[in-house]
Image (tube, rainbow, N blue to C red):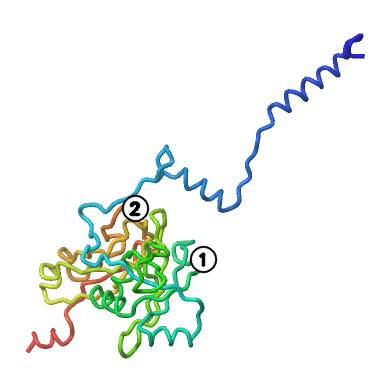
Amino acid sequence: MFAGSSIPPLHLTMLNLMRATHTRIPRLRFFSQSSAAAALVEETPSVAQDNTQVRLTYLEDFPKPDPKYAETILAVPRAASGSNISSKERKAGRVPSIVFEQEDGQHGGNKRLISVKTNQIRKLVNHLGRSFFLSRLFDLEVRPELASDEVIEKIRVLPRLLHLHAGTDAPLNVTFIRAPSHALLKVDVPLVYRGEDVSPGLRKGSYLNVIKRTVKFLCPADIIPPYIDVDLSELDVGQKFLAKDLKVHPALKLIRPEDEPICKIMGGRVSDQQKKSK
């Protein structure tokens, strides 16, 4: 049929159309949800065209972590959890702890049980203060034994939760979250109030009503601020300092409402006014 006779025009047209369609069928790649998310991350402005991630750094005019407290936290693996095991760990001079993988900036998975040195955590918390300890990155080394030189794993972590004894302030539990450079972490950043001595309102005899001691930001892991300055030098009586007035790295994202008050210069106390009237 094909050698001796010609193909009818209609059949030939359909055959050519099928061949053309077949050659133009695109090859599709199927992604899982996590792979799709990773693909979206690669298209964000924080990644250069050559697929190398741009690493953020602290800016000159903003607070940086004090290198004096750049200490490596030592840890050992812990096989199981429970109140009895935790009690034995504390008696042995260790704090039962957990390391999570970060997922949504605050919660995580891939839990790893460890124990850290009680004296080391107590020293860091005493030197830094509780809220400052919870806003600082640390290197963490997991070793077979605390005295061993062998390192099973070395990671960078952010302390997420710290439970202290009510009477002695001894550390009872610590929760860490892994903090690789690409991570975005929700951090309660401590506030440091400055300029009280030159504040017009405070110099008139008013007092400072502190509403917030920390403010939550979504922070790239490489530039988590150790604290944020609150400048009171221009606040007069009745004026408020709002969350949007905080000066931070432009890569940080405020999680709370921008108009949330941080502090306010209040009028003179009743007792002070009574003293002046006498």
| Local SS, label 1 | strand
Q: Is residue 165 above or below residue 147?
A: below
Expressed as whole percent of the image width and height from the top left, the position of residue 108 reads 49, 66
Vertical order, 274 against 156 (above or below): below
Residue 20 shown left or right of residue 80 in the figure? right
* Farthest left residue in view: 278
Query: Which of 144 and 229 lies nearest the eye of the viewer?
Result: 144
Q: Earlier in the sequence, mark 1 or mark 2?
A: 1
State the residue position of label 1: 110
Q: Amino acid under label 1?
A: Asn
Q: Which residue is painted at 36% across and 45% down in the image?
A: 54
- The kind of secondary structure element at disc 2 is loop
- In this view, the residue in front, 63 or 199, is 63
Q: Is residue 83 left or right of residue 60?
A: right
Q: Which residue is mark 2?
A: 251
- For the residues bearing labels 1 and 2, Cβ distance under 8 angstroms: no
* 3D distance between C-alphas at marks 1 and 2: 27 Å
Relative to 126, is 222 above or below? Answer: above
Instruction: Mark 1: give few (<14), some (14-19) or many (20+) Cα within 10 Å.
Output: few
Q: The C terminus lies in which quarter of the figure?
A: bottom left
The image position of residue 133, as x and y in percent, is 30, 71
Rate crowding at label 2 as few (under 14), some (14 to 19) or many (20 or more) other CA atoms within 10 Å.
Answer: few
Q: Position of residue 172 (x, y in %)?
A: 38, 83
Taking the spot 62% from the left edge, 41% from the top edge, the residue there is 29
Image quarter of residue 130: bottom left
Q: Quadrant of the N terminus?
A: top right
